[in-house]
Image (tube, rainbow, N blue to C red):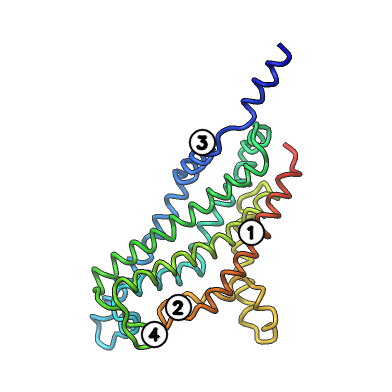
């Protein structure tokens, strides 16, 4: 009997990782405030497209985006660039705040810490949930941006910022590159937000710390005397998304900003794991 009991208990030690991930994804994507935030974010490319059409119809309207890009494929890139300044980090920070701090505030994190699931697995599941929100948000902006751009602005070859034209297929690949790059930047934001979320019981503190940190980074990057600090600021390379509209495609700024985001991602996840591993139930 004594030999059977440990074996029986050992069969309950680890829940299937796929089941944990499915449960987390259902929970995070069905949350009402997440759906509301994604819905508001989806309006960005639509409103930008309508604004471009209205500006073109008015006398003296600049229609800068359509004149520079030549067709609607510039719309998803422009929408990503505008949303990356605040809206996309806000959505990701909300998901990270609810992942640990929100669970702690509602008393459910204690059950997760006492459950037969390792702390590393718990951090992995929460990280996947935050990353899923980032991917859904970026995918929504891109898909609606492409659809709105092709309908309102028109398709055809993509006129790059360098004055050359690339085909529709190449243009879509450039938009996909911009989307993948944006997800990488948001993953870094989400990792740092998770680190803050693991150290507090108040989701609003996570939002304030994450968005406040990004704003401070943006301010510091505009001060000439602190130019030496720019290589370590996450927001320094966020303007590099416009490089996907150049020909030939320059990869230096995109690569350096991706490397910087990877460093923040590793740092954030490391801090989250360290804090969660030492946190008392």
Residue placed most toward the observer, 12 or 38: 12
Q: Nearer the viewer, mark 3 or mark 1?
A: 3
The CA span between labels 2 and 4 is 9 Å
Q: Are marks 2 and 4 in contact (CB under 8 Å)?
A: yes
At numbered mark 2, what does the secondary structure look like: helix, strand or loop? helix
Find residue 178 and name its label: none
The CA span between labels 2 and 1 is 25 Å
Find residue 19 and name its label: 3
Residue at image point 71% right, 54% down: 271
Residue placed most toward the observer, 169 or 67: 169
User: Which of the two discs, 2 and 4, labels the residue nearer the N terminus?
Assistant: 4
Q: Are marks 2 and 3 in contact (CB under 8 Å)?
A: no
In the depicted structure, whether residue 115 falls above or below residue 228: above
In the depicted structure, whether residue 227 falls above or below residue 123: below
The percent coordinates of residue 65 (x first, y second) are 35, 80
In the depicted structure, whether residue 34 falls above or below residue 232: above
Q: Nearer the viewer, mark 2 or mark 1?
A: 2
Q: Quadrant of residue 17?
A: top right
In the depicted structure, whether residue 132 falls above or below residue 218: above
The CA span between labels 4 and 1 is 34 Å
The CA span between labels 4 and 3 is 46 Å
The residue that disc 2 covers is: 242
Q: Look at the image and tell me in which quarter the C terminus lies.
A: top right
The residue that disc 1 covers is: 192
The residue that disc 4 covers is: 161
User: Which of the two discs, 2 and 3, labels the residue nearer the N terminus?
Assistant: 3
In the figure, is residue 87 to the left or right of 74?
A: right
User: Which of the two discs, 4 and 3, labels the residue nearer the N terminus?
Assistant: 3
At numbered mark 4, what does the secondary structure look like: helix, strand or loop? loop
């Amino acid at each position: 009997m004594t030999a059977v009991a440990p074996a029986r208990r050992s069969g309950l030690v680890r829940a299937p990782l796929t089941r944990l991930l499915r449960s987390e994804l259902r929970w995070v994507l069905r949350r009402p405030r997440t759906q509301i935030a994604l819905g508001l974010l989806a309006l960005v490319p639509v409103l930008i497209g309508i604004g471009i059409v209205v500006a073109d119809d008015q006398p003296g309207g600049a229609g800068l985006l359509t004149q520079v890009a030549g067709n609607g494929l510039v719309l998803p890139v422009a929408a990503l660039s505008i949303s990356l300044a605040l809206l996309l980090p806000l959505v990701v920070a909300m998901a990270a705040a609810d992942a640990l701090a929100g669970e702690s505030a509602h008393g459910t994190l204690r059950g997760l810490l006492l459950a037969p699931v390792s702390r590393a697995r718990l951090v992995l599941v929460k990280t996947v949930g935050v990353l899923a929100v980032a991917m859904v948000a970026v995918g929504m902006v891109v898909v609606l941006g492409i659809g709105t751009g092709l309908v309102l602005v028109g398709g055809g070859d993509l006129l790059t910022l360098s004055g050359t034209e690339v085909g529709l297929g190449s243009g879509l690949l450039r938009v996909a590159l911009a989307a993948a790059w944006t997800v990488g930047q948001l993953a870094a934001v989400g990792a740092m937000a998770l680190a803050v979320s693991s150290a507090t019981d108040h989701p609003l503190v996570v939002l304030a710390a994450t968005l406040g940190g990004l704003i401070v980074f943006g301010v510091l990057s505009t001060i000439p005397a602190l130019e030496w600090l720019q290589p370590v600021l996450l927001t320094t390379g966020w303007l590099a998304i416009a490089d996907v509209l150049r020909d030939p495609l320059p990869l230096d700024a995109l690569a350096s900003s991706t490397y910087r985001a990877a460093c923040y991602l590793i740092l954030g996840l490391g801090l989250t794991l360290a804090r969660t591993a030492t946190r008392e139930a």
